[in-house]
Amino acid sequence: PPLRMAGREALADFKPLVDEGKVAALLRNELGTEIRDLQLLKGGQLSQAFGFGTDGGEFVVRFNANPVGFLRDRYAAEH
């Protein structure tokens, strides 16, 4: 059922659905390296996140149609 927030109706789940195969292809293309152990991470209502490894370490990539959460993360990291 929808949630009520500040007098506005909102969907219970905004998470985008991202195809794991497309994520792997995107990461290989963008990073120029092989990706290993790509796995969907649970949690979050706004973003779809995947953990993965490369020869350079372990990472998380997050997808969201709205940039606001990323801007908040940047602000928090810088302050």
Image (tube, rainbow, N blue to C red):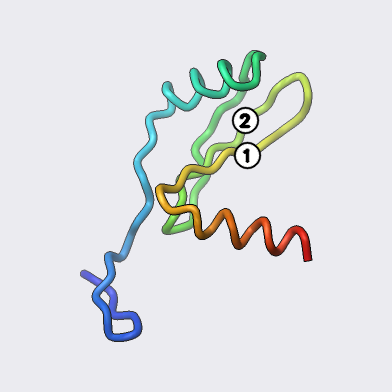
Q: Which amino acid does label 2 sit on?
A: Phe
In three-dimensional space, the C-alpha distance between marks 1 and 2, rounded to whole angstroms, equals: 6 Å
Position in image of residue 43 (x %, y %):
49, 55
For residue 32, which numbered disc appears in the image?
none
Neighbour class for label 2 at 10 Å: few (<14), some, many (≥20)?
some
Answer yes or no: do the residues labelled 1 and 2 have beta carbons within 8 Å? yes
Residue 52 lies, in percent from the top left, at 62, 30
Residue found 59% across the figure and 21% down from its top? 30
Count residues near mark 1 (Cα–Cα under 10 Å), then give few for <14, some for 14-19, many for 20+: few
The residue at the far left in this view is 1
Q: Residue at x 60, y 62 (%)?
A: 72
Quarter of the image for the C terminus: give it.
bottom right
Which comes sooner in the sequence, label 1 or label 2?
2
- Quadrant in the picture for residue 14: bottom left
Q: Residue at x 64, y 14 (%)?
A: 34
Name the spot of residue 15 as percent of width and height, x first.
38, 51
Q: In this view, does 2 lie to the left or right of 32?
A: left
Which residue is disc 2 drawn over? 52
| Furthest residue toward bottom | 7
Residue wearing tag 1? 60
Residue 20, by quadrant, is top left
30 sits to left or right of 1: right
Image location (x, y in percent) of residue 39? 53, 33
Task: Determine whether the residue tagged by mark 2 lies in a helix, strand or loop.
Answer: strand
